[in-house]
Amino acid sequence: MRRQVLVSENMAESILINGLITSGVYALLAVGFSLIFGVARIVNLAHTAFYMLAAYLVFTFTSRLGLPIPLSICLSVVSVAIVGMLSYQIVIDRLRGHEATILIATIAIALIIQESMLLAYGSSATPAIRLITGYQKILGVKVFYRELVAFGVAIILLVVTWAILMKTRLGIAIRSTAQDREIANLMGINVTRTGMITMGIALVLAAIAGAVVESTARPFMWMSPLVTVLAIVVLGGLGSIKGSFIAAFILGFVETIVTVMISEQAYLKEAVALAFMLAVILMRPEGLFGVRFEEER
Amino acid sequence: MISTVIAYVSRGYKELRGEIFVLPSRTVVVIFCLMLFLVPVITGNPHYLSILTLTCIFAIFAASWDLLSGFTGQMNFGHAAFFGVAAYTAALLNVYIGLPPWLTIPIGAIAAVLVSLILGVPCLRLRGIYLAFGTLAFPLIIKDIIPAIPGAGGTLGVQGIKAIVPISSSPVIEYYIAAALMVVLGFIMWKITDSKTGLIFHAIREDEVTVRASGINTTRYKLLAFCLSGFFAGIAGGLYVHLIGVASPDAVFTLTLSFQAIIWAVFGGIATIYGAIAGVFILYSLYSLPEYLSFSISELRMLLVAVIVLLVLFFMPEGLITWIRDKTEKTCPRCKLQNVAWRKTCRVCRVELD
Amino acid sequence: MKWLIKGVIVLLVTCLVLTVVGCGEKESVSPTPTPVPTATPKPEIKIGVIGPMSYIQGKHHLYGAEMARDEINAAGGVTVGNQSYNIKLVSIDSNEITSPSDAVAAMEKLITIENVDFVVGGFRSESVLAMQEKAMEYKTIFMGCGASEIQLCQRVAQDYNKYKYWFRVSPVNGTYLATISFMLTGMVAKTIGNLTYPEKPKIAILAENLQWADPLVAKAQQYFAAPPPNGLGMTVVGTWRPSQVATDVKTELNDIEAKGANIIYTVVSGPLGVAYTSQWGELQIPAASVGINVEAQKGNFLTITGGYGAYETTLNTFARVAITEKTIAFWDNFVSKFGEIPIYTSGTYDAIIMLKDAIVKAGTLNSDAVVTALESTNYISPAGKYVFMGNTTATPHDVAWGPGNVTGVGVQWQNGELKCVWPYAGGALGPLQYAGTVNYIIPPWVKAKLKP
């Protein structure tokens, strides 16, 4: 196949705008994932599955139950948070200490969500639900209003999350539990409850991503973002929220650059992002901002 | 002449009674192997045999994962890389050079070993989750790159791979080859874990620092684990393409395949080898069987499997076979031998079992 | 108390799940039972239908087959010698889109456990290549109704005795797909060319990243740029190859617009088709979209794209025009029975009818004899006249393409309906035009940009 790196006039703007939008969504997912891992030490492989569930629920509430779209979005976010927290309450309580098993349990949960959606709606994409239609030309690049809203929402949410983490007592509880669970417990922090609340926050982030950003839902749409989120979290360094945030933007831009610059091999964007992640962690094994964990007994 | 035969038979019988039938787990293994070999006698149907052949191949695959990740604790999320590389190597050798299966499969396995070294060396620096996700990336990158390599078949994959034997009698013979290989390789893997090397693997998982402090070169053992795991996974990969006849990126390098090895092994019982094999037989049959029952149930099969996995793990977090083993066997506190759980005293040293 | 709260939450969640699952519009596909004959049960010919049943392609495999079965059985069945048989369908989900090895296993099950006499179906080329091997192993006639890969028929030329049991019914093979899509594009190029005159239009190529698209892309790059009469003499501004399951091609579309393309030539068969067209329409990319977009053949395309699929133009096998005297009746019948318009995989309808004719002609169910009878097929179907290419050609047992045979059609979404716009009189196929064909419409926003 002929390689082609044609330069167009607004390639830089295209990379900038598209990169920002893509990264914003990834950041929502990655920060949530990182929170759950940092606090509860759970690798939640079903994280993107909940993101998908939120998109499906919006469709269900809107077109099957006839609710107005904003209400559907709120309901769907709340539902996903509840379902997520519940499944983890039941599963994680029981499996504490068996890391490998927890991992498989989260995969199983993701598969159950996938199969349920497959059963309910079949394998083709659900018809699109669009809150806002239309586009805006920014710097010569066409962007959907929806995506601007999503980007705005993402930034707001991330700022709010940062504020919670840094400025509130809850945030201190979360951060200290993430740093050292045992000591936090000794200090009187209810680590289990903190874990649950963190899980809730993370799920809300993921659910908003799914409900607001996506206009259609497909039963397998959780797999590809999962890989990217894993790459981001690893790149940024596990346990570091800041790391995940920055890495989300790095990999988001890497993917966009690949898409724009080598359009004929655009399908390689995921592979390039992964390779980039690999290269970095091989040089710096704990990721960009990661903390070297002491061996936990 | 007859007396030597009688001597062997009686020795065999004593062996059986003394070593094998005393423990339910060993008895089950023997019965299992027996049933494996009797299957073609019970049913000659090529479809059932194909499914069982695939099950045996995947059993080797899952067991090889367990050898690496279960025992040494290096979570490998990209096990499909070994499988796929061996599969493609065997496929290309067979289609372009015309090498027969009994050559392509071992060479494929060696290619997998090379990849495992390429994977293993950098992974020495990575720990825990970083290792897991680092390994996850490998097969996915290969999956996206392979179609771009000319001559590797593109997204369609390599077609027209010859079966292991000419078609006239193939399902039965293919089945026996796969089943025999599974028993032999499974036994070898189990023996490895039962040996000093296996002990070191296990120790590395529990506390690597201490092992290093004891003067053992953990790096060498970790790499050894990677290579062994890669080799056995490679054999599985080579067998697979010769059975299916096609090697395509969507079949051998997927995330799903890597995950499935982990699911099977953890479901059956991590760090046991036989757990992985049991996991494959139970779950894969559950997945393939509902087809026969009715059309609508077959849509549910993945859901069924996922729910069962979740339930089993909920009640038996260590894995199904491990749980069963713990319920049916006790270790003698003095001579450390395994005993049946309902015995009052150890079968060898007569010490009381509590 | 705590457990009470938990219990209530579990109950609520279960209700939620049930609501979602229950509200789902899952079209379950179960084989409709054959009408029970009143006299002694007739012997049956079992025909296997293999396809990705949870996707529309597989569903239409089944629908087309069911229509054929009902027609044939109602007319008295298949007469072989002096014995009359009913047709019984056995369908199986090949899962071929996700897993080629599942597809092979499904084929094997169909043949060795269900003991079918013949098989129709197949969709994804990667999987059909493997399924074909399996069917040939058992010397079972397999009529392909979905895969365009040319190798499938080239194999028949390479090893006739092994592969002779394979016939392709739909679509036409990749080479012809290229040809037809170029003709369709040529028509659009001419219309656009009138607006960009004196300059020639610029064209962008957007193809999914699957093997079947590679030769089309290569040919397109060459043909579009070559000066007439060997080509269309346009400037190819670039080629974009997103993944077939990509959900966001905004970057690619922006790039295409930035490079000044007036036409986008598409080679898409997967879900990418929905994402692409939705975004193309919503962003009002000022380029006419034409080519191959299998998703756009579906009846609910406009709903799924939220209306932005309007004016999308694609190749198709069926359209509601008089390709032959049977077409419109077939179309209406299909719609009234199944509530959807037929996509090309419902060619199983034609496959089974041709199979029946061949069996009757051969006078036996023996595969070899039926193969010989199939080779001399000359059958007027809703898609055109079917003739299989001969054993001395490069692709034996392939459906012959050309005016008078099967030509394919070009369709465009206009005013909420899928209308036929090609072939048109005065175009590449000469005077050929099917009654009911309408003119191609340039998307209004494209026209507005070119003629402000």
Image (cartoon, grey):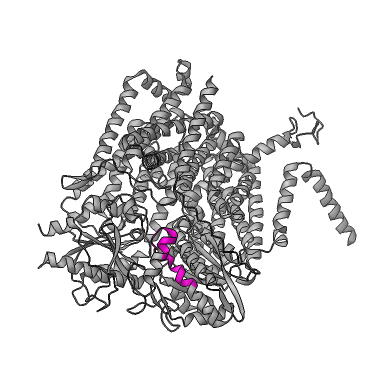
> Can residue B163 be seen from the camera position used here?
yes
Q: Residue at x 20, y 67 (%)?
A: C189
Q: Is residue C335 magenta?
A: yes
Counting labels gives 0
Instruction: Identify the residue shown where x is 55% and y is 59%.
Output: B240
Q: Which of the image's four quarters has the C terminus of chain B?
A: top right
Name the residue nearer the viewer: C261 or A130: A130
Left or right for C351, reference C432: right
Whether residue C364 is in magenta: the answer is no
Question: Would residue C236 be found to the left or right of residue B145 on screen?
Answer: left
- Say whether residue C409 is left or right of residue C346: left
Q: Nearer the viewer, residue B86 or A74?
A: A74
In the displayed image of the protein, which residue is found farthest to the front? C38
Q: Is residue A30 visible?
A: no
Return the x and y of residue C406 as percentages of the image width and height: 36, 75
Instruction: Establish if C318 lies above or below C241.
Output: below
Q: Residue furthest right?
A: B3
Magenta residue span: C333-352
Q: Quadrant of the N terminus of chain B?
A: bottom right
Residue C298 place in picture, x, y as percent: 36, 59
Q: Position of residue B191 (x, y in %)?
A: 66, 47
* Location of residue C57 with respect to B336 vertically, above or below: below
Give the main secondary structure of the magenta stretch. Answer: helix
